Image (cartoon, grey):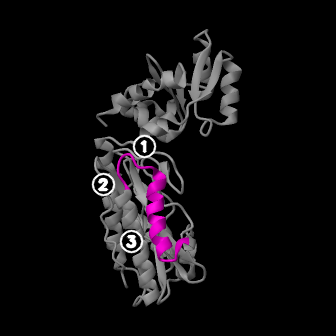
Amino acid sequence: MERSRSRVDRLRFCFSRLSVDAVLATKFPNIRYLCGFTGSAGILLVEQGKTTLFTDSRYTFQAKEEVFDARVEIVKGGVIRAVGAYLRGKRRRLRLGYSPSNVTVSQKDALSAVASNVRWIPDQDAIEDLRSIKDASELAVMRGAAEMIGDVFREVIGEIKAGLKESELAARIEYGIKQRGGSGPSFDTIVASGPRSAWAHAQPSSKPLGKNELVVLDQGAILRGYCSDMTRTVYLGRATKRVRSLYNAVLEAQEAAKSAIRPGVTAGAVDKAARGVLTRHGLARYFTHSTGHGLGLEVHEKPRLGDGEKSVLHEGMVVTVEPGVYVESFGGIRIEDDVVVTGKGSIDLTTASRELFEL
Ligand SMILES: [Mn+2]
């Protein structure tokens, strides 16, 4: 993570716009992004002149190994109280940037109880905005995560057959991720077959895969903290004309969305490109979710590629492109890839084939 130094500095550049003296990071992906710490207890305080990670004695050695661009303070009796005591020591009014969606009410109360000089200022998701644009080292890891899940899919596809339970297939995918050195799945792997494939976010069940059924596999690997997210839909048997035409429409929608991606376009325009194709095929009512989302240290992050989204795409963003159609009691089809926004357009990180596999 050679560009780590600039992360904390880039956050500091936002201080005057936010009119804050310091920013509190409590969400773990944010802490990891800014200083490298991967532990699950800690708070990072970024001030103009210094950055401090407050954590406890379980993490003494780990923090020594992992943390860059911050000094580490090992505290007793709760990190939030320690941050409060530290801020009270400033003995002046302090405008503290924080994320209302990440700081809990009890954390806020506990800190305020100790440090009455703190004035809470919403940080407008400044850290999440920084995270949305990936640097070269992040992109290299994300390419690896996307490749990994493609490799797992290619390996598992030969084992998909009627009679195998959805839950068994999901377990096989997650085993493949760990076997290849991933730290785990980016989310609970989705395997949904037959009519259940129309449930866009189905949990795998004990239902065996049946002949002449669609199977939606939505899977992702975490590699060195970074997520991939990929969906493929396969058919058990010879695909019917209807299945094939639905599949081709979804693929066409995905390609249209990918072609719409370039720096300067809105997230909503990308969604519109996918939705426009499905509308022309008379399938708009079956496309019941947004076209994609940002991807990185979290599996869902900024930006959201949804209807009417005004946020603008920038070079270095990584997003999923995942249109789908879901027909009740018939089944669903979704095709999802991870792409990076480049200077001129976008390129795929996902390596797995997008052809309709008939197994
Ligand atoms: Mn996704």
Q: Which of the numbered marks, if any, corresponds to residue 132?
A: 1
Q: Which of the numbered marks, if any, corresponds to residue 252?
A: 3
- Res. 10 in view: yes
The kind of residue tagged 3 is: Glu
Residue that appears at 59% across and 19% down: 95
The kind of residue tagged 2 is: Gly
**Would you say the magenta stretch is mainly helix, strand or loop?**
helix
Q: Check disc 2: other Cα within 10 Å, few if <14, some if 14-19, many if 20+.
A: many
The kind of residue tagged 1 is: Ser
Q: Nearer the viewer, residue 205 or 97?
A: 97
Residue 115 picture location, percent across and down: 66, 18
Is disc 3 placed on a helix, strand or loop? helix
Residue 315 drawn above or below residue 60: below
Question: Residue 271: within the magenta?
Answer: yes
> Disc 1 vs disc 3: Cβ atoms closer than 8 Å?
no
Q: Which of the numbered marks, if any, corresponds to residue 144?
A: 2
Residue 312, picture quadrant: top left
